[in-house]
Image (tube, rainbow, N blue to C red):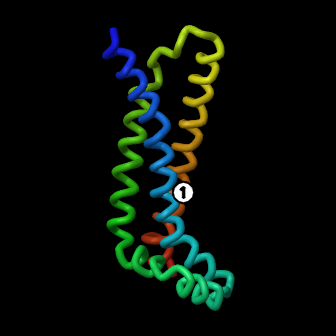
């Protein structure tokens, strides 16, 4: 009995933690590739130069963008797997906790979908847009 309660708590932590982590990593892809491209496109090269001098890690992230995208893709895949696996897990019988459980699942799914959108946007600016120019 005690093990099943711990399993449910582990699922609920993964159900929120992995999508939040996927949002963080996909945000990294957006910062490394889409943001500099946007600045150059709108003619704000000086703003980009100021940004890279304030945050020199931006250059490192851009140099290793393939690794950044690979890590983000792995985390997005894991988050999607846990979203899929946890979609029919039972929520608590207490009505208040059940509403919180359903709300957390919905928020987690929204975060995951936003993460995928950000990842795809970053991938477009990192790999497809340079070939179009």
The N terminus lies in which quarter of the figure? Answer: top left
- Residue positioned 59% across, 16% down in the render: 98
- Is residue 23 visible in the rendered image? The answer is yes
Q: Position of residue 8 (x, y in %)?
A: 41, 21
In the drawing, does residue 59 fall left or right of residue 55?
A: left
Dot 1: few (<14), some (14–19), or many (≥20) neighbours within 10 Å?
many
User: Toward the viewer: 10 or 85?
Assistant: 10
User: Which residue is denoted by mark 1 in the rendering?
Assistant: 118
- Position of residue 5 in the picture relative to residue 109 (left or right): left
Above or below — where is 15 with respect to 28? Answer: above
Q: Is residue 106 above or below residue 48?
A: above
Looking at this view, is 100 or 71 the one in front? Answer: 100
Rendering quarter of residue 86: top left
From what the image shows, is residue 77 above or below residue 121?
above
What x and y, as percent, mark residue 90? 47, 14
Q: Residue at x 65, y 16 (%)?
A: 96
Relative to 92, is 61 on the left or the right? left
The residue shown at (48%, 64%) is 28
Q: Nearer the viewer, residue 18 or 2?
A: 2
Q: How many marks?
A: 1
Q: Position of residue 39 (x, y in %)?
A: 63, 80
Quadrant of residue 103 within the rendered picture: top right
Q: Position of residue 119 (x, y in %)?
A: 49, 57
- In this rendering, the answer to whether 36 lies above or below 108 is below
One can see residue 40 in this view:
no
State the residue at coordinates (31%, 16%).
3
Q: Secondary structure at mark 1?
A: helix
- Residue extending furthest toward the front: 2
């Amino acid at each position: 009995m005690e093990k099943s309660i711990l399993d449910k708590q582990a699922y609920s932590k993964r159900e929120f933690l992995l999508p939040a982590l996927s949002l963080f990593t996909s945000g990294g892809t957006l910062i490394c590739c889409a943001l500099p491209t946007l600045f150059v496109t709108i003619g704000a090269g000086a703003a980009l130069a100021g940004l890279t001098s304030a945050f020199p890690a931006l250059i490192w992230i851009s140099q290793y963008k393939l690794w950044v995208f690979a890590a983000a893709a792995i985390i997005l895949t894991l988050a999607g797997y846990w979203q899929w696996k946890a979609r029919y897990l039972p929520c608590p019988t207490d009505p208040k906790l059940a509403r919180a459980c359903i709300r957390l699942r919905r928020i987690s799914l929204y975060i995951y979908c936003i993460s995928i959108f950000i990842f795809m946007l970053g991938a477009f600016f990192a790999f497809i847009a340079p070939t179009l120019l």
